[in-house]
Image (cartoon, rainbow, N blue to C red):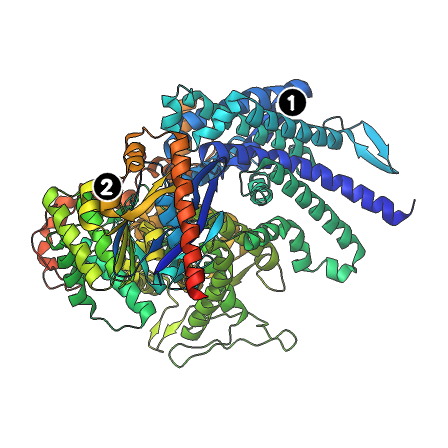
């Protein structure tokens, strides 16, 4: 047999093995989504944790492998799934997409934090292949027992799920839960038990995938967690509900990744080793996902109002003005009385708050979810880094030299100038437009999944490459601007105060948009998209415009973030960092400007909080009686806060507004001169409440 | 020429035919009703006409143009507006802003430089929701919300108004006012097609009635005639057998064919 043919067979078998593991993971994801309407972003993280548990049981404690698999995939994982359904997921089956994504992403982040703490990466761990020493020869290619087992288990899972869902009463009832839980229980079906069963099965499949993949890729928190992206990329072929198509998608992806490695072995080394080419392999599933989305038919407008739509009263301009001054004075006081480290942390928090403000526009007002806005911020910083020659008459321009070969800066002194900021916004906006277009034709969940996949692809194809990005682990030193040649922002205190002004500028922009025609349009499209359509509005256009605008604003804020922290790069803007950003934006309160400020500080001050996390670790050590390291606690707490606050549609800000409603009324005199909403008739029948939740899930 | 015609609409959901070969016509400047028991396929027909659902087969013709493939917003721009059975108000906006936003949307695509402020007040007064102007739409009574939806639909100056159970939630006096408003609208040249359970409202104010049951048109004609039709009464009381309904639907179908023949021979 020719060498080429045997290579093709060998890579094909590896591809099938990868595809089989992916199919197991993806089918677990699909079965929970199709039966509970909750898309489990933590599916990969659950598999990751179970991979570690499997290591602990089989390698560390020496339990036989088969018994270990049965214990983990047959007992521990199903139990975890059932408990999660009982305490969390059951409550959010009818919640708006932002709530269900927050809960499951919160769980993802918390599980990573937990695993980081429980299994510190400093200890080396490895898991051997199952039946690793069994080998078969097919067409001159040696196949491991592990590969055969993976393929067999995938086939068993496919067959078992098919029989369960189509041929058994239990399975058919499981499929019915998602349509109408109450109706089903009125017909005597044990819905409580059915929901738990579907999550137990999903969790078990996640664990099985984790166990099968750990010997191949090693124990790695992030890598294993991100399998969820590959899994939903495969599931997208069946719109996240069809199991046969999900299996097909998984096999196609497995083969594509494997044959890409084969192609890589054929092309010349200089091409194969270029950053973009190296990144293309890991980016394949996300490119597949975006491709599938592009060819999915345009989703029809749905009748039926969004549940749990919530609102926060929009402050009058006078109130906003007074509170702007109060905030500036407060930040000024903090800056004057603190060290440089604290000053930078405050500036960083304000920059992150400004990025979160773009989410207030997109998610809080518009109802669309993005898990990729930090990537747009990164694009802004990258543009300043790569195009540092934008001088301007108002800001000092950079005097760095340009590399004649590449046209890019040779020795970086990327200064954030007015022109570079505008250019950063423009580029982030253009990329935002390209991302929004395929994803926004579809429903909210797809936008969340699409943006996360985009963030992942952008990491691999741009941020991590030397040619286009910062390089893996790379960063650049950014120079701070000089305002009008008069105010030098080089000092930390000055830069932080500038960021406070910038945050307020963004806050005013967002509030002005909300007060005007555009804001009403956004709320209308969120509240009743079908009605907007029947009034002649193209919803897609409005949503694309909003997404593009918020991406552009995130780009500008990202460039200023870089200038604030001075040294910024790949790790600041990588995909994973999007998750805490969104979680804390929601926890702070994604429906209000105040919420973005709170969220920004919750995230930004974490760099300073090492000591407080140590205090938490000491406390946990005392309570549990075992040594607990501070490692991962920040992530665990971030996830936990997001999950706990997910039922507060207006977050911490909303709770504060409620708690201090009395204080608010002291400032009623500020409402006088405002003309943003002229009262036409002064006989309101029902007093407008501070915060109203419509049809929140019980 | 009728303003709206649907030709042999079929909507299949799995094994169920929600709409079965339904053909209806709406004449210009006329108040008409589409009635039938619950689950007859009325709202589905509305969804198909406004573009929210794609029919399994059949055609929709508006002012002589086939609009079956047009997206929702383009149909609206041709002059089809509607209200919803399950309320679709902009819950976070006040009643005033619900109508104002509709006018702003209308202005953005029509190029018609209407004065938004005064027109908003005018419309609120016309449908009778001015007292609720500043109240958020998710805190108003159902009847007011329905009227708000009507005001919003009128904001786009439509030629055809599809009203889905507009009177539920209105008291007797409000219902009468509403009926008068329908006649005014017809006098202004607008056509109204409403799905309605309030039989009095239908027979007092509608000129023409189509009766739908199990997805098929089982009777049609002037309101006074329909009121006396035994098959309609039986269908409403749930006493009509499947054979009765099939026979009635077949009769309507035959009339349609005969009518089509008349038109052909007229043309010839």
Give the side of residue A503 with respect to residue B201, left or right.
right
Residue designated by label 2: B227
Q: How far across and down, in percent of the image, does residue A266 sit?
A: 80, 55
Q: Nearer the viewer, mark 2 or mark 1?
A: 2
Q: CA distance from mark 2 to mark 1?
A: 79 Å
Residue positioned 28% across, 35% down in the render: B230
Q: Is residue A347 visible?
A: no
Q: Residue furthest bottom?
A: A393
Q: Is residue A86 visible?
A: yes
Residue positioned 39% across, 76% down in the render: A395
Neighbor class of circle 1 (other Cα within 10 Å; few <14, some 14-19, many 20+) is: some
Q: Mark 2 and mark 1, same subunit? A: no
Residue positioned 66% across, 55% down in the render: A280
Residue designated by label 1: A58
State which chain disc 1 sits on: A
**A568 in relation to B39, above or below:** below
Q: Using the image as rendered, state which of residue A619 and residue A586 is in the foreground.
A: A586
**A628 in relation to A359, above or below:** above
Q: How far across and down, in percent of the image, does residue B253 sit?
A: 42, 46
Q: Using the image as rendered, state which of residue A150 and residue A698 is in the foreground.
A: A698
């Amino acid at each position: 047999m020719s060498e080429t043919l045997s290579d093709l067979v060998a890579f094909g078998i590896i591809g099938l093995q990868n595809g089989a593991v992916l199919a197991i993971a993806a089918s677990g994801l699909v079965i929970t989504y199709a039966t509970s309407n909750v898309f489990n972003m933590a599916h990969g993280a659950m598999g990751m944790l179970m991979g570690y548990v499997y290591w602990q049981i089989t390698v560390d404690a020496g339990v036989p492998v088969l018994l270990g698999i049965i214990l983990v995939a047959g007992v521990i994982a199903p139990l975890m799934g059932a408990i999660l359904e009982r305490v969390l997921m059951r409550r959010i089956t009818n919640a708006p997409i932002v709530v269900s994504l927050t809960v499951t992403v919160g769980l993802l982040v918390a599980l990573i934090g937990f695993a980081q703490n429980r299994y510190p990466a400093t200890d080396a761990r490895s898991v051997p292949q199952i039946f690793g020493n069994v080998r078969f020869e097919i067409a001159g290619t040696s196949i491991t027992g592990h590969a055969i087992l993976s393929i067999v288990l995938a086939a068993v899972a496919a067959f078992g799920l098919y029989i369960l869902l189509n041929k058994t009463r239990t399975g058919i009832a499981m499929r019915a839960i998602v349509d109408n839980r109450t109706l089903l229980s009125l017909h005597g079906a044990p819905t409580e038990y059915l929901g738990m069963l579907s999550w137990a099965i999903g969790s078990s499949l996640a664990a099985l995938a984790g166990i099968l993949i750990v010997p191949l890729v090693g124990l790695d928190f992030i890598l294993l967690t991100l399998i969820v992206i590959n899994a939903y990329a495969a599931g997208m072929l069946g719109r996240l509900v069809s199991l046969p198509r999900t299996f097909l998608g998984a096999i196609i992806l497995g083969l594509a990744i494997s044959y890409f490695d084969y192609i890589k072995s054929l092309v010349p080394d200089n091409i194969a080793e270029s950053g973009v080419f190296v990144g293309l392999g890991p980016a394949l599933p996300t490119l597949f996902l975006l491709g599938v989305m592009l060819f999915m038919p345009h989703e029809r407008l749905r009748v039926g109002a969004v549940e749990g739509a919530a609102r926060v009263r929009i402050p009058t301009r006078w109130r906003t003005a007074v509170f702007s001054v109060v905030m500036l004075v407060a930040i000024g006081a903090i800056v004057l009385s603190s060290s440089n480290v604290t000053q930078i942390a405050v500036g960083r928090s304000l920059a992150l708050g400004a990025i979160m403000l773009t989410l207030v526009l997109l998610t809080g007002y518009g109802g669309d979810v993005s898990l990729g806005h930090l990537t747009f911020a990164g694009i802004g910083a990258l543009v300043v880094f790569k195009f540092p020659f934008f001088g301007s008459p108002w800001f000092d321009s950079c005097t760095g030299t340009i590399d004649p070969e590449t046209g890019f800066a040779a020795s970086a002194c990327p200064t954030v100038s007015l022109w570079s900021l505008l250019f950063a916004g423009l580029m982030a906006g253009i990329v935002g437009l390209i991302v929004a277009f395929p994803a926004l034709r579809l429903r909210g969940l797809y936008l969340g999944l699409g943006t996360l996949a985009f963030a992942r692809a952008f990491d691999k194809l741009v941020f991590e490459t030397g040619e286009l990005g910062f390089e893996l682990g790379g960063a650049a030193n950014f120079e701070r601007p000089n305002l009008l040649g008069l105010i030098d922002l080089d000092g930390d205190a000055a830069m932080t105060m500038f960021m406070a002004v910038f945050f307020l500028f963004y806050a005013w922009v967002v509030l002005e948009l909300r007060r005007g025609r555009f804001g009403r349009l956004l709320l209308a499209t969120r509240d009743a998209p079908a009605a907007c359509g029947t009034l002649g509005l193209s919803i897609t256009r409005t949503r694309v415009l909003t997404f593009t605008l918020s991406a552009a604003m995130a780009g500008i804020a990202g460039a200023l973030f870089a200038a604030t922290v001075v040294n910024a790069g790949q790790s600041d803007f990588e995909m994973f960092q999007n998750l805490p950003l969104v979680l804390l934006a929601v926890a702070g309160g994604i429906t209000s400007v105040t919420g973005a400020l709170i969220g920004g500080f919750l995230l930004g001050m974490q760099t300073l909080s090492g000591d407080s996390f140590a205090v938490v670790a000491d406390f946990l050590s005392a309570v549990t009686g075992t040594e607990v390291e501070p490692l991962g606690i920040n992530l665990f707490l971030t996830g936990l806060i997001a999950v706990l606050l997910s039922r507060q549609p207006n977050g911490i800000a909303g709770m504060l507004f409620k708690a201090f409603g009395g204080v608010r009324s002291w400032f009623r005199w500020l409402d006088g001169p405002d003309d943003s909403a002229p009262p036409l008739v002064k006989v309101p029948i029902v007093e407008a409440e501070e915060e109203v939740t419509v049809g929140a899930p019980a | 020429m009728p303003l709206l015609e649907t030709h042999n609409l079929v909507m299949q959901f799995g094994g169920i035919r929600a709409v079965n070969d339904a053909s209806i016509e709406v004449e210009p400047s006329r108040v008409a009703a589409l009635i039938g028991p619950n689950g007859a396929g009325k709202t589905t027909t509305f969804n198909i006409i406004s573009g929210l659902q794609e029919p399994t087969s059949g055609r929709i013709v508006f002012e002589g143009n086939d609009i079956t493939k047009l997206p929702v917003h383009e149909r609206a721009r041709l002059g089809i507006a509607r209200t919803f059975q399950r309320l679709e108000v902009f819950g976070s906006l006040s009643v005033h802003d619900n109508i104002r936003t509709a006018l702003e949307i209308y202005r953005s695509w029509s190029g018609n430089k209407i004065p938004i402020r005064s027109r908003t007040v005018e419309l609120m007064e016309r449908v009778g929701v001015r007292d609720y102007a500043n109240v958020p739409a998710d805190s108003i009574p159902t009847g007011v919300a329905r009227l708000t939806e009507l005001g919003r639909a009128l904001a786009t100056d439509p030629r055809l108004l599809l009203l889905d159970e507009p009177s539920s939630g209105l008291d007797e006096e409000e219902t009468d006012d509403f009926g008068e408003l329908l006649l005014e609208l017809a006098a202004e040249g607008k056509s109204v097609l409403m799905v309605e359970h309030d039989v009095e409202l239908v027979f007092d104010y509608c000129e023409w009635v189509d009766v739908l049951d199990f997805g098929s048109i089982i009777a049609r004609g002037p309101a006074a005639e329909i009121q006396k039709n035994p098959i309609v009464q039986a269908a409403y009381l749930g006493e009509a057998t499947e054979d009765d309904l099939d026979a009635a639907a077949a009769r309507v179908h035959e009339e349609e064919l005969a009518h089509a023949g008349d038109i052909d021979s007229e043309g010839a």
